[in-house]
Image (cartoon, rainbow, N blue to C red):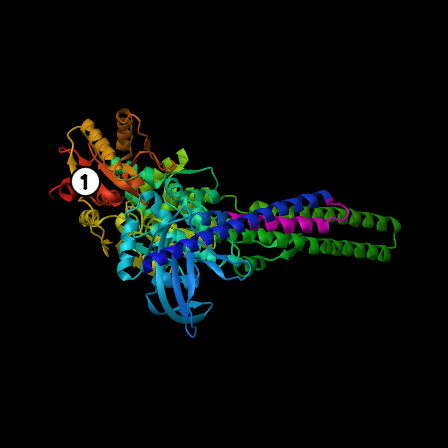
Amino acid sequence: MNHTERSRRKEEERLAETVAYIEDVLDAAEQSRIEYKQHIKQALIDLDHLDSSNSYVNILANANLLDTTGNKLHQLRSLKEKPYFARMDYKPRGHETADVLYIGKTSLSDRESHEPVIVDWRSPIANLYYEGQLGDVSYEANGYMYEGELQLKRQFQIEKRTLLDMRDIDLTARDQILQESLTTSADNRLKDIVSTIQAEQNQVIRAEMNRPMIVQGVAGSGKTTIALHRMAYYIYQFAEDFDPSELMILAPNHLFLDYVSEVLPELGVDQVTQTTFIAYATSILGNELRFVSKDQRLQILIDGPDHHEQWIASFKGSKAMKCALDRYIGDVVSDWLPDEDIRLDRYTLMSRDELRTLFVEEYTYLPPYQRLSKIKEVLKMTVKQKADLLIREVEEIYDNKIDQVRNRIKDTEDRRKRVVRLWDKREAHLEKMKLEKKRIVPDFTKQLPRKKTVSLVKDLLTKKEVSKTYFGDDLSEDNISQLVTRQRKLFKTKELDLEDAAILLYVEQALFGTDQEKKYKNIFIDEAQDYSYLELFVLRKVSQTSLFTILGDLSQGIHGYRAISDWNQVIEDIFPNANYKILKKSYRTTVEIMEKANCVIQLAPYKGMVLAEPVVRHDKEPEGILCDTQKEAMNTILDIYYRLTTQHYQSFAVITKTGHEAELIADSLRKQANSLTVELLDEHANYSHADLVVLPSYLSKGLEFDVVMIYTDQEPFKENSLDVKLLYVSMTRALHRLFVLYNQENPGIIQHSVAKGE
């Protein structure tokens, strides 16, 4: 038996021992779970309502243990089939022997010796596996630097408790392993990235957690998986004092959320809030209003560009809008300033200056409307403390006057009349003061602002004179008229632009504040290039945290008409201490596909353009296929599918430019596909594992497929910025093979960009 065979035999034995140990731990954990349930049941039986404290403590303790054991069971079950993916031998400086460490998705220790059976990939020492090279290395943990020698890095391919392959890693072998992992199906790649994280990706995942991170990553650079693993790393780092529900990931649509949902439990981030910007805004603003999504808007613009709609969307998401809102909010707050003394009779309970001091100095830590509510509470206490004293003082004044009359006036009848007159006056005055006292707080409440966020924003956007006051420096009178006309129509239908959500949210948080449960400590935004300046700004304001991880690619900015155009303004104005990282390497697609895609994106150049550098993985050239009829195209699509399924490709997508054409193609394929399942994806759909999925270009962003067939018939990609980016996005969804089917009468930019022979 040679060295390699002996090593493999030892690793197989070690794997079998690990699986057996996990089985033992699982059995013990399951037994503990049963016991905890029995303890809870018995404690409920023993519960005595007269002396229940001990029983409650017992129930609570066992419930917590049950919950902890349940989580542990879930982790162990996920480990059982594939306990680890790597090994490294690390000899700390000053030690004679090396520590043999096996790296997996979570940690496991020996119950008796407490020695690590499996080391969590997120642990500090595991960083050596991702970034260290054989020889002298160092890593940092708990503020200390540890040095030693990395003697071995070994990667395993384990499936269903069986060691399929193992390989010792040096630089050359690592490239080979990466290439092999990239040739796998799209269905497995998202789950398995933890075993092939590259050094530049690892640096982003483990980058400083107390600073915002902005990543410009080319198509296929692993932005989504980096976001998910950075979340998992964050939870690991702050596990003892952090709740995963305090993290939020904002995705472009629900289709994308469903696409990544399978990997979340494996990474331990399934408790993270997963939502879209519209859903998050609606959860704060309420459900009375509906917003047109970016994808709905884009479909409208693709069908027939509306330049009014584009510039209005751009303005409403801009820094100029943010500055106008600040002025408007400032004036609203000024109108809210208390302007009169609070009086009881002729006495001042709280002066105008006292009220204003509370508003502009004492309670500035609260949003303006909450300051008024706080002042109302102070006023209640003041009335309670002072009003009765003042009433008693007035009562004493009258009583003294009555006593003086009684002592000074000798005439009995005259004295009686004067006393009665004073008494009646006293009673009327006191009654008047008591009524005034009752009305002080209600009258103050009536003066509180009646208009809420929607009404205030409606005034700003639909009243021409108000719009001119705040937008006059940025827009012409004609532009203001166009804006006001559009907004009146939108408010009437109660279906607003997406950009209106950010405006409403900005005003809401500035004037009324946001519930604590809507504030997250750490926010991850994927496909951030489609966010406007105001959306990013308001997210920072609402959350009251700077801990954002923002990932995007300006080359995929298909919503560029309303979104950011560069990261510099975001860094300068919103996240001034952000850590900025550019990822140039594309791990998704082949050299041949990426080179064609790079040619396409250069048809719409922009400042600071970063072209993708494909990892050296070759396959066949993208094929341009001329189809004169739709029937010919359908036959070609099915022929490609049947031909390539025999080559172990598992996911196939047909991508069209528009949603309308996607519907037509899906219907045609269903009629011709016989036993094949064909699924049309829209933004609300769940991610499908159908034989063939059909979707429009703008929904494909963030997804990937083994084989992509781009089809254009009557709706070609044209040579404008939007269409160029849509085609670029569509092309870069392909992992292995790309086919472009087009009509000679409507080739658009397809023919000279990707057609065969060009």
User: As rendered, which of 271 and 58 lies closer to the eye?
Assistant: 58
Residue 172 drawn in magenta: no
The prevailing secondary structure element of the residues shown in magenta is helix
Left-right relation of 25 to 742: right
State which quadrant residue 355 falls in.
bottom right
Looking at the image, which residue is at 69% across and 49% down? Answer: 56
The quadrant of the image that shows the C terminus is top left
User: As rendered, which of 334 and 142 lies closer to the eye?
Assistant: 142
Residue 15 x/y as whole percent: 43, 53
Residue 53 drawn in magenta: yes
Left-right relation of 596 to 519: left
User: As rendered, which of 613 and 502 lies closer to the eye?
Assistant: 613
The quadrant of the image that shows the N terminus is bottom left
Task: Read off the residue under disc 1.
Answer: 718
Q: Residues within 10 Å of mark 1 (few under 14, many from 20)?
A: some
Asked if residue 173 shows in the view, the reply is: yes
Farthest left residue? Answer: 757
Amino acid beneath label 1:
Lys
- Name the element at disc 1: loop
Residue 582 x/y as whole percent: 29, 58
Magenta part of the chain: 46-73
Looking at the image, which residue is at 24% across and 44% down? Answer: 736
Up/down of 169 relative to 714, above or below: below
State which quadrant residue 93 falls in.
bottom left
User: As rendered, which of 418 and 315 lies closer to the eye?
Assistant: 315
Up/down of 609 relative to 686, above or below: below
Up/down of 484 relative to 104, above or below: above
Residue 187 x/y as whole percent: 34, 42
Up/down of 578 relative to 676, above or below: below
Asked if residue 218 shows in the view, the reply is: no
Looking at the image, which residue is at 35% across and 36% down? Answer: 689
Residue 185 x/y as whole percent: 31, 43
